[in-house]
Image (cartoon, helix red, strand yellow):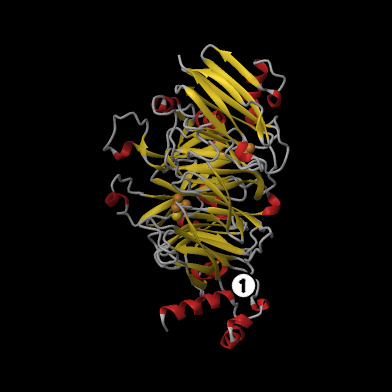
Amino acid sequence: MTEETKKTEFSRRSVLGGSALAAGIGMMAVGSTLMPQTVHAKGKNEVAPGDLDDYYGFWSGGQSGEVRILGLPSMRELMRIPVFNRCSATGWGQTNESIKILTEHMLPKEKKYWADKGGFPLNGDTHHPHMSFTDGSYDGRYVFINDKANTRVARIRCDIMKVDKIISIPNAASIHGLRPQKFPRTDYIFANGEHRVPLPNDGSVLDDPSKYHAVFSAIDADEMKVAWQVIVDGNLDNVDADYQGKYAIASCYNSEEGVTLAEMTSSEQDWAVIFDIKAIEAGVKAGDFKIYDGDVPVLDGRKGSRYTRYIPISNSPHGVNATPDGKYMMINGKLSPTVSVIEMSRIPDLFKDKIKPRDAIVAEPELGLGPLHTAFDNRGNAYTTLFLDSQICKWSIDKAIQKYQGKDVEPILDKIDVQYQPGHNHTSMGETKDADGEWLISLNKFSKDRYINVGPLKPESEQLIDISGSKMKVVHDGPTFAEPHDCIIVHRSLVNPKNSYGHDDPLFADLTAQAIKDGFESLDEADGIIRDGNKVRVYMYSMAPTFSMEKFTVKQGDEVTVIVTNIDDVDDLTHGFCLSNYGVAMEVPPLGSASVTFMADDPGVHWFYCQWFCHALHMEMRGRMLVEPK
Ligand code: CUK
Ligand code: CUA
């Protein structure tokens, strides 16, 4: 076969499903123009133009610092939510409202460090997006996301799909694993500080590993404040919460507590550490803690503590995943070919020291090389990514337990190649008690030959896999930019965003208060210039296709704040405000406001315009700022 015919063969096969294949090829021989449209069997994942998806996918954006929303099963990217990154389209990182969110919960020492460097970092590294839970399933209120790069946690409001809180985590270094409490509701977000750092980290310690600690944090999800922290042995990696609201379990590597790679991987046994939430809360009440940075109680959960138990797991475990029935917790082996299955009902006895730590393990199937993360369907099956084998392994949890008990059964049910080297995977609703067993996403670290070449930096690759049958089936390949570590797949019935903000949204409380102080009746009627020394506030509203102010005048050296309120009560009518050659641009959402502050240093006439397409006369939606020379 020549390269050309191979390609035709391939594309024909991907169009024609299974039994239609033979008929299709027969017809092609007669002449491809005769092939009737009806031969094209509608794939289960096909969402026709105009049709809506069944699921929201929330994707981390890795080192891009953002979160993305996809529709599934079409895999269409629907929206990007700037979180820790600077966004040119929306003005995130430039508007006063976003700067407040980015800076208000920084630690005092961070504020000091960033004071002369723009105020806050412009990068992030998002790994683990998770939605808030009520009673073991998603409740559609929030999505939480970690920032490994700058040790932060953010919360996204799902009614407007924007971030409303970002907090810095004291005492810890590099927040990696992140999970919400599942039951009875998400009171806490659990967050792993991955890197061990000296505590306190004041520059007096470098090479004394005994002074280095990894810190586990519980964040009050409603207040977005760290409630308590626990020091543990080893490095913290991933974490999951149980379905009873009693325990959180984290994987730990580097039990050697080394600071170099050779030291970190020398031991055969690392561990999973279990946190007893009620015991920790009692310890906080009893005053059994120290305070370091940030006014947060820090408890000692190192070996021998009543707050924790350590279960030995083979070298460098990684993913931690609770089964939808709440019975088991999977610890994925990474450098070991196994997944260790912890039975949650044995944990109380472990804390009472009635059983030995390893007695909590009820199965340890050998699945293949490089198991990183496990996802679940609603039929008792687990799906584990094998990084080194570039495969997904489907296995039966019951059979793995039977095998561990010595029965002659094979837990592995199916293996499928993915392209290539998967990290996380995730099933539809699979981290909730409502796992539905329809879809699996494999997030692959390399795309190699799957797409046309775009230069030395290649996209990563994600694949959609139909898991509703007995055999897994890859039905879609898609490229992704840097680098979705993880995702969740949420049924669309659980998410209900608004179409416009409303001026009473808490996001605009500061602007409203200022507008009233400045003598306006409300924010949406604010239209005029307020001079306050060299501070100038320019209020205008936008209504397609005009700004209420055609021109305004300020003086060179003024600190100008432009406040734009969009009074168009029409779905999907976003305006913008972009000030030419001043580097200023922001999104002005329906029935919402945005403000930006800049120095009017450059004298002359400067056009501002609406940069979000809004009307047939969108191009004409503009005005002038005159900066008078000093
Ligand atoms: S981690 Cu990246 S593949 Cu940050 Cu959840 Cu496992
Ligand atoms: Cu308003 Cu474009």
Quadrant location of the N terminus? bottom left
Q: Residue at x 64, y 16 (%)?
A: 518
Q: Find residue 401 and report its horizontal and vertical position in percent.
A: 53, 67
Farthest residue to the top: give it: 533
**Residue 310 visible within the image:** no
Neighbourhood count class around disc 1 (C-alpha, 10 Å): few under 14, some 14–19, many 20 upward: few
Task: Give the amino acid at mark 1.
Answer: Gly
Where does ligand 2 appear, by image quarter? top right
Quarter-wise, where is residue 55 in the image? Answer: bottom right
Which residue is depicted at the point 54% across and 53% down?
487
Q: Position of residue 618 (x, y in %)?
A: 63, 40
The residue wearing badge 1 is 469
Decide: is 402 above or below 555.
Answer: below
Give x and y (percent) for residue 541.
66, 28
Q: Nearer the viewer, residue 570 or 75?
A: 570
Say if disc 1 is inside 8 Å of ligand 1. no
